[in-house]
Image (cartoon, rainbow, N blue to C red):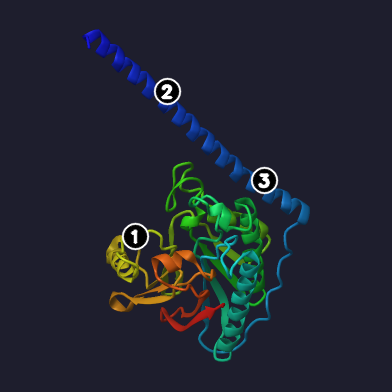
């Protein structure tokens, strides 16, 4: 081929590449615009619902607990609810019952603790994956009973009602919210989206809807999921809470080694100091020791018969959540409960 022919062929290839790039950019723009429209629609629907239905009236505070003794704080880890997911034994109706049961057991166990000492405050950790969504992986749309849009409002209603119930039994509720990988908006891997900025996450959107609904509840303090983790304080007790999906490459189907290794690295000064860590994501219960008495508490999911748990961690995924009671002066866990929900 002549030099002129080579030059023309090269120009044609460049033109074809430019056209392909423009098509890709146009497709990405359309996908991002579609996602942005959906997020905007959720916020608009939430505002409309508040206008039509109103927001709950302030919940009356419980009678002042006059028991003497050293007060403790309830610490509830509610994670991996996956509202909208469908398995052989799980769907949105089951999620509603299990959320209600989690709250009922929290209240009952708190009353048992109060026989010995005051428990006036409750800290709630919303650990991510509050909804299943429909675009996390191929064919996911066939494994849900609601659209992503409807899942957001179902989760907000169920968790909002749970917090209102707790508010009737505690002087104050503090919420720490972190995002999960199922909260990712659009295509991508883990919580990283190719279609939208990482700060936009369905878990965070659910939290925003709940906060707007509970705006009149002055006894609720909310820490937004503006980062992938929080280090909260209950007196001298400092807890690290994150979803757990940042722990990868643990080898085989036993994630304990990877969990311990990552948290030991974080505890070496990479992260702010923490007493214990709380994660979900793996759908199985574990308590793993770190150095200097620190521990990592892995809380199961509310989902039973989880395909993820069977495939990746060889577990039947018995549904449960976690409740601890904290001594704020001594900075330690005094009581540990697994709230079994099967």
Up-down: is 196 above or below 95? Answer: above
* Residue at the limit of the structure toward the right, as seen here: 52
* Residue positioned 72% across, 48% down in the render: 48
**Quadrant in which the C terminus appears:** bottom right
Disc sitting over residue 248 in the figure: 1
303 or 37: which is nearer to us? 303
Residue 185 in the image, given as x and y percentages of width and height: 51, 48
CB atoms at circles 1 and 3 under 8 Å apart? no
Q: Is residue 280 visible?
A: no
* Residue positioned 45% across, 74% down in the render: 235
Q: Which residue is mark 3?
A: 44
Mark whose residue sits in front, 2 or 1: 2
Mark whose residue sits in front, 2 or 3: 2
**Quarter of the view holding residue 282:** bottom left
Query: Is 61 on the left-hand or right-hand side of 90?
Result: right
189 or 236: which is nearer to us? 189
| Mark 1: few/some/many CA within 10 Å (<14, 14-19, 20+) | few
| Mark 3: few/some/many CA within 10 Å (<14, 14-19, 20+) | few
- For marks 2 and 3 on the same chain, the one whose residue lies earlier in the sequence: 2
Disc sitting over residue 19 in the figure: 2
Residue 169 in the image, given as x and y percentages of width and height: 64, 77
């Amino acid at each position: 081929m002549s030099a002129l022919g080579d030059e023309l062929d090269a120009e044609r290839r460049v033109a074809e590449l430019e056209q392909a790039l423009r098509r890709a950019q146009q497709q990405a723009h359309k996908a991002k615009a579609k996602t942005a429209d959906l997020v905007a629609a959720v916020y608009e629907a939430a505002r409309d619902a508040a206008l039509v239905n109103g927001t709950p009236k302030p919940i009356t505070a419980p009678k002042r607990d006059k028991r003497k003794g050293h007060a403790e704080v309830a610490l509830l880890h509610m994670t991996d609810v996956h509202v909208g997911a469908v398995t052989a034994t799980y769907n949105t109706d089951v999620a509603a019952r299990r959320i209600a049961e989690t709250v009922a057991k929290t209240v009952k166990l708190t009353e048992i603790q109060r026989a010995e000492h005051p428990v006036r405050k409750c800290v709630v950790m919303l650990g991510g994956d509050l909804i299943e969504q429909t675009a996390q992986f191929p064919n996911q749309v066939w494994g849900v009973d609601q659209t992503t849009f409807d899942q957001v409002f179902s989760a907000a209603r169920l968790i909002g009602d749970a917090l209102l119930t707790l508010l009737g039994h505690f002087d104050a509720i503090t919420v720490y919210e972190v995002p999960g990988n199922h909260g990712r908006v659009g295509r991508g891997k883990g919580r990283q989206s190719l279609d939208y900025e990482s700060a936009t996450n369905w878990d965070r959107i659910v939290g925003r809807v709940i906060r707007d609904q509970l705006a009149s509840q002055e006894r609720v303090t909310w820490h937004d999921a503006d980062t992938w983790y929080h280090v909260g304080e209950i007196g001298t007790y400092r807890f690290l809470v994150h979803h757990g999906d940042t722990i990868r490459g643990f080898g085989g189907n036993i994630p304990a080694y990877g969990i311990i290794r990552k948290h030991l690295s974080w505890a070496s000064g990479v992260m702010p100091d923490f007493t214990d860590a709380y994660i979900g994501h793996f759908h199985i219960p574990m308590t793993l020791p770190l150095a200097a008495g620190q521990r990592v508490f892995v809380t199961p999911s509310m989902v039973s018969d989880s395909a993820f748990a069977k495939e990746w961690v060889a577990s039947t995924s018995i549904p449960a959540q976690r409740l601890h009671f904290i001594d704020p002066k001594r900075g330690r866990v005094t009581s540990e409960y697994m709230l079994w929900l099967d």
